[in-house]
Image (cartoon, rainbow, N blue to C red):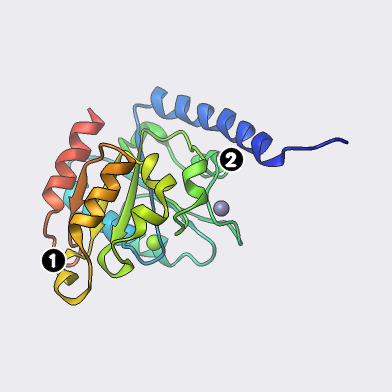
């Protein structure tokens, strides 16, 4: 009997294209951050705050991944930075080929920092390398403190975790120590406790980004 392992070969093709993307980023000196997390965790809000803080000093670009709509891309576009929207039309993650196609719409020589906002999902985006330099998971207080426990794969591959909406800690049964312990079980990751609404904690995140970029 012939058994075809589709997932493995798909991932192999993806990794090859991811390496091509990586080479293009390296050649143009672009630092690339893949931002992942559940729908509603605040990925776009984090990007908006980050752009607001950095755009006068760093040339930023954004690739927005969503199943449908250009809602988030419009929010980013209003900041004045170049943005390309990818509509996956059902696919629950971005892959390296989608990024390669999106890159044809950018002049990489004019970008220092590129954010890729992945499709809201805590599972399969973790399995698809895009050619990025850093992978960040955005989690948020209303989602509950159990996400690192229930989706360890996502946290295991991450380089950093942003815990958003800490201004809501008083309103939810969210044990921040449990959350941190479970993240640390996945790896020695920096955890940034922020509120994109009040701007609390954002400076620590921005500092880390600056250090990583160097
Ligand atoms: Mg979004
Ligand atoms: Zn998927």
In the image, taking residue 11 as reference, residue 134 lies left or right, namely left
| Measured Cα–Cα span from mark 1 to mark 2 | 37 Å
In the image, taking residue 18 as reference, residue 42 lies left or right, namely left
Tell me, yes or no, if residue 65 can be seen here: yes
Q: Residue furthest right?
A: 1
Instruction: Find residue 51 and report its horizontal and vertical position in percent.
Output: 24, 51
**Image height of 173 relative to 149, above or below:** below
For numbered disc 2, what is the local secondary structure?
helix
Tell which of 214 and 119 is nearer to you: 119
Tell me, yes or no, if residue 56 can be seen here: no
The residue tagged 2 is 97
Q: Which residue lies furthest to the bottom in this view?
A: 171
For numbered disc 1, what is the local secondary structure?
loop
Residue at position x 41%, y 56% in the image: 150
**Image height of 213 relative to 146, above or below:** above
Q: Nearer the viewer, mark 1 or mark 2?
A: 1
Instruction: Find residue 194 and report its horizontal and vertical position in percent.
Output: 17, 57
Disc 2 packing (10 Å; few <14; some 14–19; many ≥20): some
Label 2 CB less than 8 angstroms from ligand 2: no
The residue tagged 1 is 198
């Amino acid at each position: 009997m012939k058994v075809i392992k589709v997932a493995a070969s798909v991932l192999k093709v993806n990794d090859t294209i991811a390496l091509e993307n990586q080479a293009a980023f390296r050649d143009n000196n672009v630092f690339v951050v893949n931002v992942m997390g559940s729908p509603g965790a605040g990925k776009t809000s984090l990007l908006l705050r980050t752009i607001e803080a950095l755009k006068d000093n760093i040339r930023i670009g954004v690739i927005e991944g969503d199943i449908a709509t250009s809602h988030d891309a419009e929010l980013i576009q209003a900041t004045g930075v170049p943005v390309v929207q990818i509509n996956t039309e059902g696919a629950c993650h971005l892959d390296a080929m989608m990024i390669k196609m999106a890159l044809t719409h950018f002049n990489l020589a004019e970008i220092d920092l590129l954010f890729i906002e992945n499709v809201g999902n805590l599972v399969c985006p973790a399995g698809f390398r895009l050619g990025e330099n850093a992978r960040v998971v955005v989690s948020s207080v209303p989602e509950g403190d159990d996400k690192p426990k229930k989706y360890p794969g996502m946290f295991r591959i991450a380089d950093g975790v942003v815990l958003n909406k800490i201004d809501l800690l008083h309103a939810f049964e969210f044990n921040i120590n449990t959350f941190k312990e479970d993240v640390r079980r996945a790896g020695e990751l920096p955890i940034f406790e922020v509120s994109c609404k009040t701007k609390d904690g954002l400076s620590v995140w921005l500092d880390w980004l600056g250090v990583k970029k160097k």
